[in-house]
Every structure is written in structure tokens, then in C-alpha cells.
Image (cartoon, coloured by chain):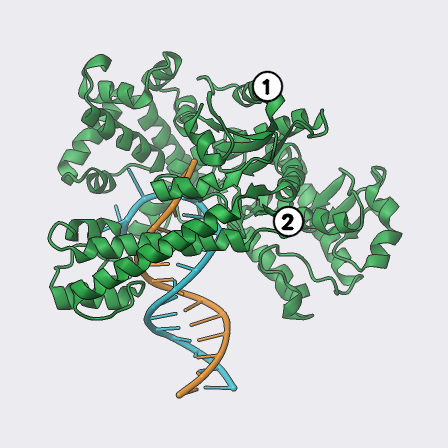
Chain colours: A green, B orange, C cyan
Amino acid sequence: MQEKSLICINNQNNEYLIAIKKILETNTITKVTYNIKSQYKILQKYGIKLSENTHDILLENYILKGIMQCNEFIKKINQDFLLKESKYFIHKQTNELSPYYDIYHIPHYILKIHYKNKKFLNKEIKLKSILYDIDRPIAKILYEMENNGVLLNCIKLKNQSQEIEKKLACLQLKAYTLANEHFNILSNEQTRHILFHKIGFKNIDKTPKGKNSINETVLKIFSQNHRLPNIILKYRKLYKLKSNYLDKLTKMVNINTGRIHTSYCQHSTSTGRLTSYYPNLQNIPKKTLEGEKIREAFIAPDKYLILTVDYSQIELRILAHFSADKLLIKSFYNKDDVHTATASNIFDIEINKITIQQRQIAKIINFSVIYGITPFGLSKKLNITMKEAKHYIDMYFKKHYGILNFIKKTLVSTSKKGYTSTLFGRKIYIPNINSDNTNIRKAAQRACVNAPMQGTTADIIKKAMIKVNEYLSLTNFQYGKMIIQVHDELIFEIKENKIDEITKNICFIMENITLLNVPLMVNIGIGKNWNQANKIA
DNA sequence: GGCTAACCCACTCG
DNA sequence: TCACGAGTGGGTTAGCC
């Protein structure tokens, strides 16, 4: 493709877009743009289908330079081209370019950046593959998922909101009585005053800024001696549920479709994960009864079912692959319960004699390993002394020396290069890995240990999304659509009479998307709503 | 004194 | 240090007019 055939597209006025429709749709002319997902959305309004060979300088910058520099890049674009015009033209959520910019100035700038990126990409074959085989195709799929949306039972949510409102009023009254005065329970300052000055609790933990912490852990401990902390805890949780989920979700339903259409952002994490916003569908509650009720409101349309497929223990499996740790690999091949197997290794007890408590300790240790384990962190989590925590960690690494080796190697290499990599070569920059400040450096080291696992999971599920979407497209999506992604889980809407066949094929695609030295496995759930699907396999 | 943006903190999820 | 990665929202505060 000759370079002179490159043109740029951005938010344009109606006539201009219709005039260049043919150019935008043909595969013989290469296009370059900024934030391609938002372009798909705009062009859809004019019935224009952007051709495959369109480059996106935003994704190029994200993949080549990492999140920090990409954020700087976005800031610069906004400053140079958007703020100059009028701040009202910037869409905060979608980061779309203003429709009224200097059409000669920006295209030139975009091309210049693309040519520069192209040179770097030709030298970085793995990054080129991440861009063209993963992130660039994902952009279109995300646009389609946003379009699909998810059906919501608003009546259910509104009823629940009213119930919670009554409970909140009741809790508020109790809190005022116990405190012997009116105060704003949502105000941490006022709550601190009541708890520490009026009732006389002694501080047991600090916030990052040095104030007396009144978070969940602290209030739970306080609850042993007084009734008020537990009331505050309940109030805060219910309030959050009502404002952030029940009321927010009902407000965000599109009146034309009756559905929630979230937005996904593929350039806002250091590890390559997606984020969901406006509203965020990746943190819908599930761990409490009230949370389950909220998930019940995410429903399938008539003659359809909700299918959820999530990767089982995927980060530990990736750790097994990276570290080649013999015991971890063995437990996945034997299909042992991985936490029980870990407990058996740490405590040197046969698997069938492991107690629930020992399994629980091993489970926390397994998570800690993925997050960058330290005696301090583990002691807090297990509520034991640092010395005991260190003992557990020593026992763990004595058996899992492959993992210890992997962690050491990752730290040395990241300290040298400034970045670590996923299995497929995505670079994850760790800017503070050599910081002089011990705390900052230690935090960077923990992030560095976690990054290959979290980032590889993100790559794997993106690859799976591309293949699964390709499969569903074969029948023109009439039997099923992908509607939500939650990091290691995909949620679909599937035609009832095709559910067995399609579920089987999606699972096959997901489990065989890449070859690790341990098997990839998925859990499935099917139901009329999201909660039912979480319960019924 | 009044307004707003940025920060802090607590909550939700994987 | 209060584990890794995120988004949201209410309260508080800093800074401006």
C-alpha cells in the first residue's frame, strides 16, 4: 500500500462523511484514525462501515509506549486540538475528538504519528502482533458488544431500591439513637468524631494519608464492643448498593433499546485489561444476597438464555506455565483442588487429610503469590504475626522453588529493562522498579510480579473473544451474541434451542485458544438471568 | 462568601 | 507498605473569582 493513499478520518460533519463513504468502506485504501472504536460509533449513524485496514494511532501508542506515555499522548491531543476549540466538544467518557476541528491540521498530525509508530512496530514483531492480532480486532468487537447491550429488568431494581430506602431510614434512626446525636453517616469526618471522640474507640489503623481509618476491617473489630460500628457498616454498604447500582443502572437504560450499553476502554490499564464505564459492568455485586438480587435484574430476552463462561484459576495456571513449577503443574494435571494441593505441599500432609482451615490458609497464600507476597501483607490477611507469615512463605517457596525462581528472574529482568512482558509479548512498563524510595520500589516489585499473570489473562481472553465472535458471526449472530466481559469471564445471550451446541463450541474455543504447559479450563453457567447463570452450571 | 476541580476514602468486582 | 488491577460517588478541601 502506497503511503500517499493514506487518509485520515475523524468526527466530521454529515456531508463530508457521506462524500467520502466509498473511501472509508473500500479495502484498497488504507486509513489512519484516532480512537477507532469511537469512529465506528459515529460512522454507524451514517450507515458507513469502516474497512478493516484502518489504523489507530491511539492503540499504536498504547501498545508501543505503555499506559503512562499513552495518557500523556491523550492529554497532548486534547490540549493541542480540542481545548483550543471549545471544551464543550470533548466527550469525557468516550474521549472523542471534537467534530469541529481544523481538518487540514489534525490529519497531518495523525499521519506523522502513524509513520513514526510504523517504524517502531516493524522493529517490534511481537508488539506488532499484539496490535494487529489482538487489540485492533478487539476494538470492533467491543463496539459491537456496546451496541448489543444487556437487557435489564428495571421494575425489579426499582422495587429493591424502595426496600433499601426503608432499611436505610431504619438504620439511620438507630445510628442517631446510639450516637445520641444526628450526624452524616456518609461523612468520614463526622463518623470519626463520633467513634473516636464521643464513644472513645482507640485508633487501630491509618488511612494512606495518616488519618484514623474507619474502613470495613476496623469497623468489624469495633463491632465487638459497640452496636454503632456495625450499623454504620450496614448503612454504608446499602447506600452504595442503592446509589451506585440500583438507581444508577435504572437511569442508564437506553429508552429505545431497554438495555444498558456500557462503554469499554482498551487503553486505560497498565496490564492490557479492559475497563468498563458509564456504567461499569465489571463490578456488579455478587457476593451478598442483595448483590445477587441485582444480578437477577440482568436478564435474557424471550426465547434466549444467559450463558456465562469463566476461566478456572487462570492466573495460577499461567503462573504454572511461566514458572514451570513441578508441583503446581502436577496439581493442575491431576485436576486436584489447587488450594488443597497447595495446603498439602506447605503442611506436608496428605491431600485427603487437609482441613478446611488449612485449605483456607493455602488459598490466601496462593492469591498472595499472584499479588506479590510479603510477610507483612500475609500477616494482615491471615491475622497472624509477621514471623508466622514468614514461616508460611518459607514453607511455600521451599516446595514451590520453581515459582520463587520465576519471581526472582522477573524482578531482575524488569529492573534492567524497565518493563515485564506477557506470554505473547505485550510490554508492561514498571516505572518505579528502581526507585530510591523503598516503599515505592517495593510496591513496584509487587506490581511487577503480578503483571505477567494479569496481562497474559487479558491477552488470552481477548484472543478468545476474537475467535468466539468469529464463530458466532458464522450464523450472523442470530443464535447468540457476546454481551459482557469481566476480565476472565464472558457473558452471552444464546437462543434457547441452540444452547447446548453453542455452549459446547464456545467452551472448546476458549479452552483451546492457546497451549500452556497446563490445561486451560472453563466453568459454565446457564440461566434466565445473570444470577441464575452464576448458580447453575 | 460562593463555586468548582481535585483529592480522599470507602465501596464494588476479577 | 496495609497485597495486584480497575470505576464510581459522596464528602472534604484547595484555589479561584
Q: Secondary structure at mark 1?
A: helix
* Residue at the image position 32 percent from the left and 16 percent from the top: A327
Q: Position of residue A154 (x, y in %)?
A: 52, 48
Q: Earlier in the sequence, mark 2 or mark 1?
A: 2
Q: Position of residue A332 (x, y in %)?
A: 38, 17
Which image quadrant: the N terminus of chain A?
top right
A325 to the left or right of A207: right
Q: Which mark is residue A150?
A: none
- The answer to whether residue A43 is visible is yes
Q: What residue is shown with label 2?
A: A58
Residue type, mark 2 in image: Leu
Q: Is residue A179 above or below residue A493?
A: below
Pick the residue in front: A445 or A285. A285
* Residue at the image position 67 percent from the left and 36 percent from the top: A122
Q: Position of residue A514 (x, y in %)?
A: 54, 21
Tag 1 subunit: A
Tag 2 subunit: A
Q: Is residue A23 above or below residue A339?
A: below
Q: What residue is shown with label 1?
A: A505
* Residue at the image position 33 percent from the left and 52 percent from the top: A237
Snapshot quadrant of residue A167: bottom left
How far apart, in angstroms, are the residues tagged by discs 2 and 1? Answer: 34 Å
Q: Secondary structure at mark 2?
A: helix
Residue type, mark 1 in image: Asn
A40 to the left or right of A294: right
- The answer to whether residue A445 is visible is no
Q: Is residue A117 above or below residue A109?
A: above
